[in-house]
Each structure stands twice: as structure tokens, then as C-alpha cells.
Amino acid sequence: MARSPVTSAFGRYWTAEAVSGFGTYVTLLALQTLVIVQLHGSALDVGWLNAARWLPWLMFGLVVGVLMDRLRRRPVLVLAHVTQAVALAFIPICWAVGLLTMPVLLLLVLLWGGGSLVNASASMAFLPRLVTRDRLQLAHARLDGADAVAQNAGPAVGGALATVIGAPATVLVALCTHVLAAATTASIRIDEPVPSVPSRRAFGREISEGLRWIYRSRELRPVAVGTHVWFAGQAVLGTALATWALDQLQLMPFQFGLAVSGAGLGAVVGAVLSTAVGRRIGAGRAVIGAHVVSVVGVILMVTAVVGTGWASWVLLALGQGAHGFAMGLSTSHEMSYRQAMTPDALQGRTNTTLRSFNRAVVVVVAPLGGLLAVGAGLATALIVAAALFVGAALLLALSPFRRVRSVG
């Protein structure tokens, strides 16, 4: 039987991640509703919103990855949570005084995304210092389970609050979660040494070292490229979904939030089953199969147009549930495989380089997805998203990753 990854330090880390994850899902639902309902935006505006969120990864991701290998990661996490809270605080303030426009919102989301970049980079580099490598997959499965619960509850709570008190005020809930996460992370007791990296070493050389480690590696390169393609599909889906639900299907924000919560419920099931499925069919095949399930999920979302009201909602929620199940099933295997293959001295650069490239894909593809939705139709955009998920599955199926059995 696999040993539990839980220690006091990991428990506090898990709590902070769960709380901030809940706040993030509340924020995302509130921001999309704010753009479409309060600011009367389109799918293209949602695309710009998503691009602004991830733009810091494109601009600074590789540099932040190097810094994470030079710094103690716990205090960086605390600072990142505080930065995100401050950025979110200005959204309801600007709305209250009549200054919230799309450019102002994009600027604040850009700052929030910058905090998210530092947060995620430090978080993933911090985890291998809290658990041993043979328990990384179990640790990720527990984190994925918490994220899945947050993904289930966050949109539902966000949708309900946006309906009752409005999207701008709903952002205040997320602000509080980042404050709580900062306090919880600060309470973690761990002897975290400063990494022994020469302070005068050239950033460019360290960035190149991280890039070579990923894209010249027979083990990591297929996973990296497959993930980039998956994120392209997710960018198109994320850009079209809110407009599809609120405008095309004529759902209320509360109904939209509940439908998105279906992804969270599916992710809970996927995360719970991920370890068992990986043992039975292998980690590689589990990830490939998960991408195929995402294709089925998007097809269900497209068919929601044949119904009206709650009938449309059921199909949309089922599609979200299937896609969420796929994410819950695959994430822990991909993350633990990548971390198990990477030495501690390269953890920050490896995690942040891959995430930066993934988010760079979103920055480029999200506005293009918005243009596609406006020009060719929302249904066409969703079908393109499904095709990209097929591409991600094929890339992994044709690589050595399909033969990976376990991580440890």
C-alpha cells in the first residue's frame, strides 16, 4: 500500500493551495461575468481577459524560473499571495467609483496574473522539498483533489454571488482567500536552505540550461509539446465557453456557474481514481485516455445548443464534468513524472519554463479563439478546441510516454 504524503508542512501547504484555488475559481467566474454582463463585452473581450491573465508568463516566466532556483520558496509564496490580493482589491474599488473599463480591468488582471506566475513557480518548486520523490504522485493527487473540489464549489459560489451581489463585489471573496493562503503558508515550518547557485552566474545561461533539459530530453520533450497543444485547445475552449453559455444558451450567471462546477465534480472523481487507474493501465495511457475524454466533453458542450433552459444546462454540465474528469485524471501523472525526472537544482526552471510556454500559448491563442468565435461562430470554435485535444492525445500516443507505467 502506498504511504501517505501527509506531514504537518505538507498539510499546511495543501490547505493554502486549496483555499487560494477556491478563490481563483470564484475570481475567474466573476471576471468573465463582469466582462459579458457589466461591461457588455464579447468573446473577443474574454479572449483578451485570458491573454492578460497569462501575459506575465510570456514576459517574465523564464526569468522567474531562474529566480526560484536561487531563492527560498516559502517567503516568495507569501509575497505572491499578498500581491494577488492587492490586485483584486482594486477591481471592486474601481467599479464603485466608476473607473472600471476594459483597459483598467486588463491592467489589474495583468498584475493578478503576475502574482499567479510567481505563486505557481514557487509552489511547484517548493513541493519536492516537502515530500519524497516516491510520494510525489500521491501528493499531486491530493492537491488535484483539493483543486477539483475548489473547481466544483468555486464557480457555483461565484455564480450565485454574481447573481445576488454582482460580479465586482464577488471578487472580494477571492481577495480574502489569498490573504488566508498567505497566512497559512507563512506558518509552515521547514528548514529551507538557500540553493547553492552562484549569484553572478548569467541568467541567459541558466535559462538555456532549463530549455535544453526539457526540449532535448527524450523523456520530457513529448510531454512538453503535447501539453502545449492541450493548452491551445483549452485557450479556445475557455474563450468561447462563457459567451456560449450566457449569450448562445441564454443561461443565467448562476446556471453558468453550476455548469462549470460540473468540471470540478468530474475532477474530484478523476483525481480520486488517478492513482488506481495509473497502476492498472500505466501513467502514460491514463494521460492519453484522459485527453480523449476531454474531446467527448467538448462535443457534449456543443450539443447543448439543441436544448433550452435547464436542458441546455444538463448537456453543458455533463460536458464540463467529462472535461474535468480528464484533467483530474491526468494532471498528477504528468506533474509527478516531470518532477521525478528533474533534479532539485532544475525544478524551478523546469516547472516555470513549461508553464511559461503553456501560458504563452494561451496569450497567443486566446485572442485568436475570440476572433474565430466572432467570425466563424462559437460552435466552430468549440469544435476546433476538440480537434486540438485530439492532437494532444495523438502526440503522446506516438511517443515513448505511452509506455510509462509508474512514477517514483
Image: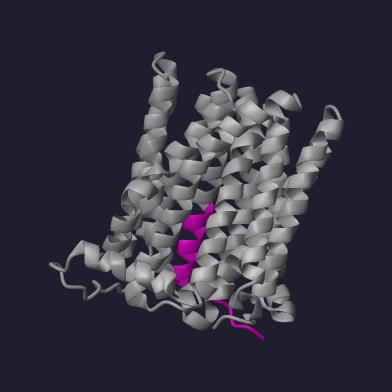
Of all residues, the one furthest to the left in this rendering is 200
Question: Where is residue 14 drawn, in percent x and y?
Answer: 51, 62
Q: Is residue 26 magenta?
A: no
Q: Residue at x 39, y 14 (%)?
A: 97
Answer above or below: position of 282 versus 14. Answer: below
- Left or right relative to 158: residue 269: right
Q: Nearer the viewer, residue 54 or 222?
A: 222
Left or right: 175, with 198 as reference point? right
Percent of width and height locating residue 205: 23, 67
Q: Residue furthest top?
A: 98
Q: Name the spot of residue 111 as percent of width and height, x first.
A: 35, 38
207 relative to 248 in the view: left or right? left
Q: Would residue 356 be seen by someone viewing this image from the given angle?
A: yes
Q: How many marks?
A: 0
Quadrant housing the N terminus: bottom right
Q: Residue at x 60, y 78 (%)?
A: 400
Classify residue 142 as left or right of residue 132.
right
Q: Identify the image's colour scheme: rainbow, by chain, secondary structure or one colour.
A: one colour
Is 5 inside the magenta-drawn segment? yes
Q: Main secondary structure of the magenta part?
A: helix
Quarter in which the C terminus is drawn: bottom right
Q: 197 above or below 102?
A: below
Question: Which residue occupies the foreground of this view, 390 or 70?
Answer: 390
Residue for point 56% across, 52% down: 231
> Which quadrant of the structure image shows residue 255?
top right
**Relative height, residue 285 to residue 325 (above, below):** below
Q: Nearer the viewer, residue 288 or 212?
A: 212
Q: Could you say where residue 13 lies in the image, as x and y percent from the top left?
A: 46, 63
Q: Nearer the viewer, residue 257 or 324?
A: 324
Let me know if residue 85 appears in the view. Answer: no
The magenta segment: 1-18
